[in-house]
C-alpha cells in the first residue's frame, strides 16, 4: 500500500470531495453549450416521442422513434432506459440546455464516485482507488459521452448502473446476503436496458467468481458457491433477451452492415486503436478515417493481430500470477469486445467512437493506478501518500485534465465539432458532409457545393458523400447532374434506401414518373429497409392515377 498509515475500513470522505471538485472543474464549461444539431435537435427537441410520459411504455415494447408521426424513423437499437431519462429531463428542464448539461455532469460524477468505491473494494488502498478514479474522471476519451447531450444521456446512465451492479455483487460476496445478489441482478438488467455494452457485466461477474476463488477450493465447491450468481445472471439475460425480441423483433441486429469476416478482420486494428487512444489521448475526434478491412492482406491486419496476441498472452500470464492485473486486462478486453462485435451493425463512419470504451477504460485506469502504487518508496510524503506515487499521479492528472479541457471546447457548437474532426481525420466523410449540410440549410449553396465536391474528390465511392452531393446539386437546380450522381450512388451502395428515395423524388419533379417508379421498384428489390420505399411507391402510383383521372384527354404526362 502507498498509504503511510493503516488502511481504514472504508475510503476517506475527503478523497470523495476532492474527486467531485476536480471532475466538476474539468467539465464546468459545458453548461454554456447549446443543444447541437448533431442528434440533440432531431432526437430531443424535434422528437415528440422524447417529450411525453405517455411514450415511456413504448420504449420497452417497440422501437425508439425519431418522430411520432407516420414518417417516423425507427432506430436500430434497444435502449429504453436512456429514453426514459430523456423524457424525465425534458419534463424537468424543457429545452434549456444548461440543466441538461448539469444533469449529465451529475450522472458522470456519480459514475466516477461509484468507480472509486469499486476500486477501493478491489484493492483496499486509498491511493489506488483515488488514482484510478482520478484518471478515469479526467481522461479525454470520456469527453464525447459527457460534453455532448445526446452522448451523456446514454454513456453516463449505463456507467452508473454498471458500476452499481458490480459493487452490489462484491457486497454479496462479502456477506452472501440474497438481497445484494437480487440488487445486483436488477441493476444488471437495467444496465442492459441502457446500452448493449452492459452485456459484458455478467461475463465479468462470473469471471471474478472464478479468478478470485479461495485457495485450494475444489471444483464442486466452486460450482456450489457460484451457482446463485450464475443462476441470477441467467435469469437476467433471459429477461433481457425476451424484452429485446419484443421491442426490436431481433436478438442481435435486424439488418447487418458488414459480414462476420469483415468484423473479425477489422477487430484487431480497432482494439489497438482504442488502446492507443487510452494511453496516448491526443488528436481525439468524433469521427476518424475508418473503414472495415476488406482483406487479410491489408497491412492494418497483421501487426494489430500480433499486438492482440501479445495482449492475450500477457493477460493469461497475469491471470495465473497476478490475478487482479489479469482481471483488469480482462475487463478492458471483454467490455471492448461488445462494440467490436457491434461493427457488424455499424456503418463505416460509426465503427470507431471513443465513447465506445467509456466503461472499459476503468480497467486500464485501475491498472495504471496499481503501477503508480509500485513506484519506489521514498521517505518524503505528499498528500499523505509516498511522494513518488503522489507526484506521478499529479503529473498524469494535470496532463489528462488539460487535454480534457482542451477537448471539451470543441463541443461548444456544431461547426467546431465538424472542423476539429476534419483536422484530425482529413479523409473522414461524415464531418465534411455535415458541415456542407449546415451551409446548405443556411442557403449558402455555393459553399455547400464546393465542400461536397471536395469531399467527392477525397472519397468518390462513399455513399453518404454521394447522397449529400446529389441533394446539393438538386438545391442548386442542377437536377440532371443530381440524377447522374445519385444513380452512381445506387451502383456503389445498392442497399441504401435513402438513395432510391432521393432519386425517385427528383425524377418525379422532372415528370419522369415511369423512371421514378422503376427506381423505387429496384430499391424494394435490393435495399435493406423497404417499408418506406413501398409507401413511396404506393403514394406515387396513387398520385399518378389521380392525375390521369383528372386529365383523361390530355395524355398521361408520363415521359417515356
Image (spheres, rainbow, N blue to C red):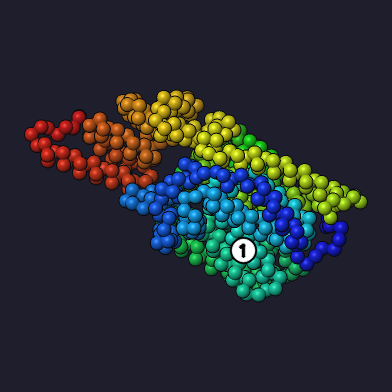
Residue beneath the point at 41% across and 58% down: 52
Q: In this view, does 119 lie to the left or right of 434?
A: right
Quadrant of the image occupied by residue 234: bottom right
What residue sits 12% from the left and 39% below the top? Answer: 550
Give the quarter of the image for residue 328: bottom right
**Numbered marks: total:** 1
Whether 350 is drawn above or below 110: the answer is: above
- As displayed, is residue 433 above or below residue 386? above
- Taking depth in this image into account, of 162 and 499 the one nearest to the observer is 162
Secondary-structure class at tag 1: helix
The relative height of residue 228 versus residue 520 in the rendered view (above or below) is below
Residue 434 seen: yes
Residue found 64% across the figure and 55% down from its top: 109
Closest to the observer: 316 or 518?
A: 518
Please identify the residue farthest to the right as the structure is shown: 379
Q: What residue is rendered at 75% in x and 68% in y?
A: 214
For the residue pair 317 and 159, the one nearer the viewer reads as: 159
At which x and y percent is residue 158? 57, 56
Q: In the rendered view, does 257 fall on the left or right side of 373?
A: left
| Residue 308 spot, x, y in % from top left | 66, 44
Residue 350: % across, % down:
51, 42
Residue nearer the viewer, 105 or 128:
105
- Residue 335 visible, this angle: no
Left or right: where 318 falls relative to 454: right
Apparent side of residue 99 relative to residue 474 in the rendered image (left or right): right
The N terminus is located in which quarter? bottom right
Residue beneath label 1, please?
A: 165
In which quadrant will I find the C terminus? top left
> Mark 1, residues whose alpha carbon is within 10 Å: few (<14), some, or many (≥20)?
many
Q: Where is residue 511? Give x, y as percent.
A: 22, 31
Amino acid at each position: 500500500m502507498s498509504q503511510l498509515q493503516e488502511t481504514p475500513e472504508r475510503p476517506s470522505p475527503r478523497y470523495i470531495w476532492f474527486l467531485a471538485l476536480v471532475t466538476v472543474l474539468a467539465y464546468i464549461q459545458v453548461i454554456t453549450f447549446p443543444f447541437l444539431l448533431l442528434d440533440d435537435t432531431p432526437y430531443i427537441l424535434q422528437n415528440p416521442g422524447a417529450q411525453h410520459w405517455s411514450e415511456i411504455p413504448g420504449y420497452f415494447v417497440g422501437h425508439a422513434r425519431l418522430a411520432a408521426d407516420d414518417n417516423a424513423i425507427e432506430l436500430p437499437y434497444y435502449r429504453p432506459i436512456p429514453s426514459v431519462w430523456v423524457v424525465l429531463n425534458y419534463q424537468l428542464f424543457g429545452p434549456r440546455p444548461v440543466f441538461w448539461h448539469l444533469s449529465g455532469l451529475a450522472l458522470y460524477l456519480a459514475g466516477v464516485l461509484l468507480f472509486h468505491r469499486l476500486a477501493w473494494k478491489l484493492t483496499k488502498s486509498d491511493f489506488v482507488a483515488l488514482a484510478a478514479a482520478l484518471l478515469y474522471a479526467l481522461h479525454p476519451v470520456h469527453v464525447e459521452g459527457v460534453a455532448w447531450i445526446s452522448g451523456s444521456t446514454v454513456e453516463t446512465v449505463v456507467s452508473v448502473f454498471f458500476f452499481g451492479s458490480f459493487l452490489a455483487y462484491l457486497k454479496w460476496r462479502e456477506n452472501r446476503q440474497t438481497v445484494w445478489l437480487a440488487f445486483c441482478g436488477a441493476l444488471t438488467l437495467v444496465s442492459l436496458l441502457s446500452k448493449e455494452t452492459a452485456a459484458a457485466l455478467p461475463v465479468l461477474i462470473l469471471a471474478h467468481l472464478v479468478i478470485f476463488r479461495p485457495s485450494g477450493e475444489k471444483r464442486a465447491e466452486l460450482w456450489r458457491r457460484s451457482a446463485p450468481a450464475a443462476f441470477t445472471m441467467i435469469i437476467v439475460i433471459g429477461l433481457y433477451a425476451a424484452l429485446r425480441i419484443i421491442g426490436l423483433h431481433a436478438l442481435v441486429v435486424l439488418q447487418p452492415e458488414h459480414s462476420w469476416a469483415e468484423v473479425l478482420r477489422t477487430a484487431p486494428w480497432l482494439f489497438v486503436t482504442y488502446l492507443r487512444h487510452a494511453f496516448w489521448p491526443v488528436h481525439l475526434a468524433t469521427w476518424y478515417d475508418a473503414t472495415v478491412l476488406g482483406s487479410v492482406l491489408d497491412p492494418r491486419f497483421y501487426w494489430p493481430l500480433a499486438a492482440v496476441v501479445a495482449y492475450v498472452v500477457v493477460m493469461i500470464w497475469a491471470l495465473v500470477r497476478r490475478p487482479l492485473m489479469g482481471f483488469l486486462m480482462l475487463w478492458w478486453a471483454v467490455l471492448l469486445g461488445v462494440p467490436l462485435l457491434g461493427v457488424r451493425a455499424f456503418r463505416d463512419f460509426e465503427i470507431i467512437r471513443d465513447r465506445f470504451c467509456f466503461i472499459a477504460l476503468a480497467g486500464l485506469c485501475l491498472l495504471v493506478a496499481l503501477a503508480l502504487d509500485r513506484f519506489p518508496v521514498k521517505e518524503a510524503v505528499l498528500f499523505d501518500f509516498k511522494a513518488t506515487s503522489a507526484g506521478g499521479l499529479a503529473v498524469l492528472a494535470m496532463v489528462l485534465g488539460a487535454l480534457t479541457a482542451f477537448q471539451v471546447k470543441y463541443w461548444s457548437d456544431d461547426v467546431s465539432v465538424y472542423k476539429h474532426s476534419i483536422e484530425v481525420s482529413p479523409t473522414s466523410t461524415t464531418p465534411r458532409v455535415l458541415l456542407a449540410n449546415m451551409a446548405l440549410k443556411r442557403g449558402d449553396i455555393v459553399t455547400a457545393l464546393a465542400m461536397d465536391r471536395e469531399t467527392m474528390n477525397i472519397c468518390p465511392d462513399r455513399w453518404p458523400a454521394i447522397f449529400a452531393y446529389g441533394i446539393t446539386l438538386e438545391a442548386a437546380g442542377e437536377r440532371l447532374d443530381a440524377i447522374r450522381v445519385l444513380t452512381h450512388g445506387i451502383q456503389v451502395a445498392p442497399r441504401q434506401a435513402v438513395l432510391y428515395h432521393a432519386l425517385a423524388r427528383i425524377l418525379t419533379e422532372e415528370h419522369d414518373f415511369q423512371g421514378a417508379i422503376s427506381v423505387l421498384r429496384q430499391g424494394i428489390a435490393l435495399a435493406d429497409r423497404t417499408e418506406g420505399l413501398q409507401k413511396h411507391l404506393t403514394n406515387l402510383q396513387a398520385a399518378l392515377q389521380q392525375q390521369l383521372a383528372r386529365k383523361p384527354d390530355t395524355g398521361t404526362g408520363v415521359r417515356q
